[in-house]
Image: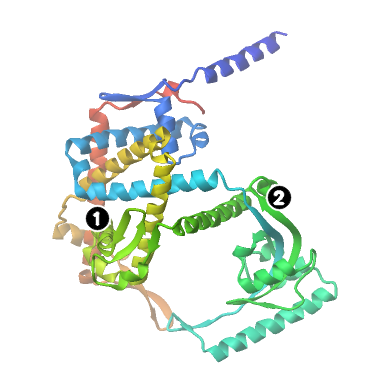
Amino acid sequence: MKKIAVFMFVVCAIAMNAACKRDSDVLATYNSGKITRGEFHEWLDAHHINRDSIMKKKKQQASKLQTMGLWKLAAAEAKKAGFDQTEDFKAIADISTESQLISIVLKKEIGEKTDFNEPAVKLRQIVLNVKNYTMVNNKRVDIKKSELEKEFEKAIQEAKAIIVRLDAGDSFEELAKKHSQDFSKSKGGEVGFVVRSMLEPPLAKVVFELPLGQYSKEPVRLSNAVAIVKVEEKTNLTSRNIEDVVGNKVQAARLKNKLLREAGENYILSLKNAPDVSITLENISKKDKNAVLYKVGNDVCTLGDLEKRIDIITTRIFKDPKAKNKITDEQKTRLAESMLRYSLLKRVAEQKGIVRDPDYVKKIEIRRESLLAREYMKQIGNKEIKIGEKEIRDEYERNKDKRYYTMKKVGGKSQKVIMPYSEARERIDKTLTMKQQSAAVTAWKNKLLHAENFKVMENELSGE
């Protein structure tokens, strides 16, 4: 009885301890502030970090708390320096906010509301790949159309021979293990559940017309392969049954995300078809900066607006102004479509009050603070550092046979050839510069945490 009483006491003590963990509990302190449990949970959620996973280990919590504290302190330093008011940071922050708004609107309008109902089949397959290239001087070169047809004909004949064996009663699974040339081979050709949009049109037509339990009586020609398929199960996947029907959690999640993405694209298409939306992306090829690319109500985007966004990406993010000249009209079109998607979803967010939702506003504030911290620390690391010639030469001499060499064929054998110093010098200079920049940022972080007397309250953390 005593043992039972002790056991019950321990259980109760654990339960009380768990119940006593409040959002107001202080998990970390520093001279100018503190981090409570509630704030920590909000920070994890805002950065899409799995809270349940983090809470299992005290070490993981301590690490994330230090990162959170460092970013809060670095953001405060950035504000003191006026970095948050610079055009560079404002531009990057705007792009980040756009991305977050798109994500949250699609989550609320699609992820939380969509009830899809999609025909699906459980598929087994035998795939015979058709090689459409040959190697010339270690480079892939497309083969001639006539040669490609010969390769397809060989694969088709091989597939027909396999079908003859299937007709004779041989196991589809065993034949797949022996002959198939794709990822499903080791599983006897088992692919799992697929929906129509996951398959090439010729294959989709065959798969969704095959009777249950039957295999294709003729080889199916694909873009770079020939296939034989067997339908093992037919069903309709819905948002309510997909996990139970598919069984495999990873595959179910992948299928669900695909169906939600398709629902999202259809939703965007419906927004594009609104009467006050006009899209003229063909104007991208023009030189007039006032040429209109799209209108969403009173929101107008011109070629000049697109050029400004390209400037932000090339000079502020890629740090390469010359990259602007390499951007093609096709790439410009994709960027303009992304900007259009944001304009469409921003209007939804404004109409439905999402932009005023306290949870959304809070997450935006947290993410902006973190972005400010990271960009400011990046600037600290990007301060000009000059590496001396002796330092570069010493690095070359110490490691030329370990890092600065190429492998060349000499007499039919691979042989290590040391790079001349003149060829390796620029690479060494960049490597040493990056190392010193990284060391400078690390030293700055440690100094800041030490100066603020940052401390994690280990006794307040949960888990092991």
For label 1, the SS is: helix
Q: How many marks?
A: 2
How far from the left and from the top, in percent, is residue 369? 30, 38
Please tell me which of labels 1 and 2 falls first in the chain.
Answer: 2
Q: Amino acid at mark 2?
A: Val
**Which is more toward the observer, 276 or 127?**
276
Mark 1 → mark 2, Cα distance in angstroms: 48 Å
**Colouring scheme applied when the structure was drawn:** rainbow
Q: Amino acid at mark 1?
A: Arg
Residue occupying the point 51% across, 28% down: 463
Q: Is residue 63 visible?
A: no
Checking the image for residue 316, the label placed there is: 1
Q: Quadrant of residue 337?
A: bottom left
Return the residue found at the far right. Answer: 168
User: Which residue position holds label 2?
Assistant: 245
Mark 1 surroundings within 10 Å by alpha-carbon count, few (fewer than 14), some (14 through 19), many (20 or more): some
**Which is more toward the observer, 370 or 104?**
104
Return the residue found at the far top. Answer: 2
- Looking at the picture, does residue 424 appear above or below residue 218? above
For label 2, the SS is: helix
Label pair 1/2, CB-CB below 8 angstroms = no
Residue occupying the point 38% across, 40% down: 355
In the rendered structure, the answer to whether residue 55 lies left or right of residue 350 reads right
Residue occupying the point 33% across, 66% down: 332
How far from the left and from the top, in percent, is residue 165? 80, 76
- Looking at the picture, does residue 173 appear above or below residue 436? below
How far from the left and from the top, in percent, is residue 88? 22, 50
Q: Is residue 435 visible?
A: yes
In the rendered structure, the answer to whether residue 353 lies left or right of residue 158 reads left
Mark 2 surroundings within 10 Å by alpha-carbon count, few (fewer than 14), some (14 through 19), many (20 or more): some
Checking the image for residue 220, the label placed there is: none
Residue occupying the point 61% across, 85% down: 151
